[in-house]
Image: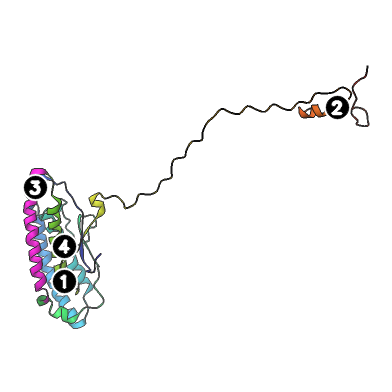
Amino acid sequence: MGDYPYELEVDFEPKRSRLTTFFRFLLAIPHVVAIAVVGLVSVFAVIAMWFSQVFAGRSIPGAHRFVLGTVRWSIRLGAYMLLATDRYPPFSLDPGPDFPVRVVGPEEPAPEASRWKALLRYFLAIPWGILNFAYMVVAYLAAIGSWFAILVTGRQPEGLQKAIHMGLASNLQYYSFYALLTDRWPPIEPELRLEPRARGALPSSAPATAPAPVPAAVGPAPAPEAPATTTALPGVPGQDADAGAAFGEEPKRGGGDGGWLPPASR
């Protein structure tokens, strides 16, 4: 994230539905009615937050969460109407982590708020309001171009989609300041986060794989060694025993004294 507490996180979606694009504004009517009612309640929550920040130097957590949810809902609706996504937005104030256009930022207010910034908020927000208007004009023009491109090709050019995303990011950061969600100055250039997984980017480094084992050279098997043989000489005591031991035979013992038997003499 950048230095500003709230920013827009988006997924790039090149392939689009011609059918839902053609009827986009008709499909968005239920959300327009719902957000109008929720937005009216949100105005009273912002007024309560203004008094709390000016006189107590801190915001109201419940009102903060409600206003943040309203901003989330309006950003999702804006993304759908401006063709930043084909996904139908939920009727919810919750974060919606699976939606292709997401508001990223703290759920709870800061422990302290600037009294003088809260008191003069609507005067301080004028320059950013003008800047946001310029970004939104570009976003609306990009949405018109995208409408024709999608109906003809079934795809949305990346440059047009990024222009819409920049307008939505500017809208988010302007209204988060205007609606007292933060007293940080909004950036001149909207902070936008493009998710690598949405662009199909590969990881920066592939996991190392062990090299395949090299098979050992196969040659003819060595010939077995012939067992050593001993030629028996007649009349030499103990030679028969050595020869027999070489072939694993038990030596023949004779007599009670256990001596070797000499060969018979003729």
Label 4 is placed on what type of residue?
Ala
Label 3 is placed on what type of residue?
Ala
Q: SS for tag 1?
A: helix
Alpha carbon separation for disc pair 2 and 4: 104 Å
Q: SS for tag 4?
A: helix
Alpha carbon separation for disc pair 4 and 1: 13 Å
- Mark 4 vs 1, N-terminal side: 4
Q: Residues within 10 Å of mark 1 (few under 14, many from 20)?
A: many
- Labels 2 & 1 near each other (Cβ < 8 A): no
| Residue picked out by circle 2 | 252
- Residue 169 is marked as 4
- Mark 2 vs 4, N-terminal side: 4
- Mark 3 vs 1, N-terminal side: 3
Q: Position of residue 70 (x, y in %)?
A: 16, 65
User: Where does the magenta region start and end?
Assistant: 124-153
Q: SS for tag 3?
A: helix
Q: Is residue 28 above or below residue 243?
A: below
| Residue picked out by circle 1 | 177
- Mark 2 vs 1, N-terminal side: 1
Q: Is 148 a magenta residue?
A: yes
- Of residue 239 and residue 253, the one placed in the foreground of this image is 239
Direction top: furthest residue: 266
